[in-house]
Image (tube, rainbow, N blue to C red):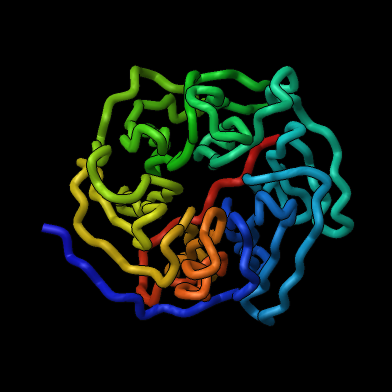
Amino acid sequence: MTDIYEFEGKTLCNTNSVLGEGPTYDPDSNTVWWFNILGKELHELNLSTNAKKVHPLPAMASVLARIDAGRQLIATEEGLFVRDVASGKLTFYAALENDKPENRSNDGRTHPSGALWIGTMSKRAENQAGAIYHVAGGKVTKIFNGISIPNSICFSPDGTIGYYTDSRLNRLMRVMVDPQTGLPAGEPIVLVDSANEPGDIDGSVVDADGYIWNSRWGAGVVDRYNPDGLRISRYKVPAVQPSCPAFIGVNADRLAVTTAWEGLDEDARSAQPSAGALLELGIEVKGIFDPVYVI
């Protein structure tokens, strides 16, 4: 039985992104980073000072991975770039589907080995137009093909299990992974089949105990699954389209979630002023920090 909880959290940032996505946290600076994909923006919120910055980008981007205190790796519709934190300068790092200008990056996360998994999709969300790639040391390898809307890329704390979904199919997949390289070491199997339930499996993150926290797009909730795929709790949020969670705070004991107002009409937006905001669930979690990308 799933325990259901009302929202008792708060709004961390009320800048209403069309499509808020890709949140991550930098423990060195106590800063949350996330994207407004369709608005071509990178958002920055310092939790110590509450200082907020919005960095315009030359292209749609969706994933940020820390490299070190001064550099970040970001995935965009034009490939992978190293971003200088101080200046914002982007330096080309690696191509990502440069033969498919109709595609863009979507969900992604760094594996404990320091490799990155990054998904791509059609800008028009065409069926099976995208894929999921493994990126390590500048080498880009396609690992899963025929994905329509890649999401939920995340890993068990020991790096032996990977998760992902095609949100159009609405099945959370589980695959064994080589903990040393971050490459798949087996065939994916279905862990959670929610094809017949309201809402879509969107972004996910795994806590220190191996439990999966998932934003359910269209349902206005964040779900928590145990490692066997059993949904044990559901947390309501005041936005029908939550997109991705992230552990934040100096102890990784808080949970933030990005949201979106993409596709909502005026009435729907008026009914949920938090659509597009960065929210925090008012609960204590046992999170872990995203690993750094090894360049």
* 286 or 126: nearer the viewer: 126
Question: Split into 4 quadrants, where in the image is the C terminus?
Answer: top right
> Is residue 162 depicted above or below 55 in this figure?
above
Q: Is residue 113 above or below residue 18?
A: above
Above or below residue 82? Residue 240 is below
The picture places residue 228, in percent across and down from the top left corner, at 20, 41
Residue 10 on image: x %, y %: 47, 79
Residue 117 seen in this snapshot = no
Is 270 on the left or on the right of 8, as rendered? right
Q: Quadrant of residue 141?
A: top right
Depth check: give the residue in front, 167 or 154.
167
Residue 128, percent from left and from top:
49, 23
Q: Position of residue 223 (x, y in %)?
A: 30, 56
- Quadrant in which residue 122 is drawn: top right
105 relative to 281 in the view: left or right: right
Q: Quadrant of the N terminus?
A: bottom left
Of all residues, the one furthest to the left in this rendering is 1
Q: Which residue is drawn at the image coordinates 27% and 29% (left, top)? A: 190
